[in-house]
Image (cartoon, grey):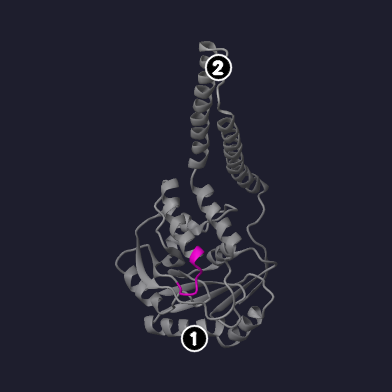
Amino acid sequence: MVKISFILPIYNEEKNIPILYRELSKVIASIGCDYELVCIDDKWKDNSLQVLLDLQQHDKKIKIIEFSRNFWHEMAVKAGMDIVDGDYVVMMDCDMQDPPHLIEKMYNKMQGGYDVVYAKRWKRAKKDWMFKNTATFLFYRMLNRLTNLYIPEDTWNFRIYTKQINDLVKNFNEQSRFLRGLFAWVWYKQSSVEYDRWDRLHGQTWYGFWKLLKLALDGVFSFSDKPLKMATLFWFLFSGVWFLLGLFFVIMKFVNPNLYVSGITTLIVLIFLIGWIQLIILGMIGEYIGRIYNETKGRPLYIVKKIYE
């Protein structure tokens, strides 16, 4: 019998867990497969862990990984990838925005010889704020222009994939993880299923502005060196502008030493512009150096306090 492993990162989801469990039970029964539910408690102040332990008393297929502290979503997924052993792996959030009934459709599509089938949003949740929708739309388009990979647009981590893919991706141990980029990097044969993203039932989203910004930076700086090349391009461009401007003033002074040459405003604007660009370039270089620094420390990606089986 085929076995499907479910990786379920848990963060402030105590009210959503029972609902998700009921829906997943229906999906598992419909597919007719063996299964395991690997739940990663990413340490929050709600009662999620106790809810999981109560469910485990009735279903021994549930495995619970308790972190020592909050290590964030990408690391929680990594912990799940490290211990699953199913023929297929389903990765999804527990906020009920990813409709569980879609898993059967994704699983059936896998039978066509695909290694990964990911869910692609046709419509975003109604409650998502406009800035987030616009920023996400622009982010994917920008990311695909900046990298040499094709990262499927309008996707999240909701996907099903083979054990072979899991064994590959789990061995990538970089500190700044961007899972969609890692799956795109290994590629293999991938396809998608479109869906309308649901609204969150209970609780608050994991991703506020700053976490979304960090995720975007991880995506860009982990899979592209084009920002550094852009810094070189800016240097050439504005070096040329300054040279031509300086040459113009020198020539004008030689042509007519008594001629007043205006241009103070232009100089001031250019000085501010050059300073602004220098700060951007230093920031980009700092991002790369910071990532190198984090990798050289060699710390574990997460620390497990206890595993409940």
Any magenta on residue 171?
no
For label 2, the SS is loop
In the rendered structure, are the residues bearing label 1 and label 2 in contact, judged by CB atoms less than 8 Å apart?
A: no
Residue 129 shown in magenta:
yes
Residue toward you, 52 or 46: 46
Tell me how many marks there are: 2
Q: Relative to residue 265, is residue 221 depicted above or below?
A: below
Disc nearest the viewer among 1 and 2 = 2
The image shows residue 122, relative to residue 232, as above or below, that is below
Inter-mark Cα distance, 1 to 2 = 84 Å
Question: Callout 1: 10 Å neighbours few (<14), some, many (20+)?
Answer: few
Q: Dividing the image into 4 quarters, which one contains the N terminus?
A: bottom left
Q: Amino acid at mark 2?
A: Leu
- Give the residue pinned by disc 2: 259
Q: Residue at x 44, y 56 (%)?
A: 138
Residue at 58 percent across and 56 percent down: it is 214
- The local crowd at label 2, few if under 14, some if 14 to 19, many if 20 or more residues have their Cα within 10 Å, is few
Residue at x 67% of width, y 63% of height = 303
> Left or right: 183 with respect to 190?
right
Q: Is residue 117 left or right of residue 230?
A: left
Q: SS class of the residue under badge 1?
A: helix
The residue that disc 1 covers is 22
The range drawn in magenta is: 125-131
- The image shows residue 290 at horizontal and vertical percentages of 64, 46
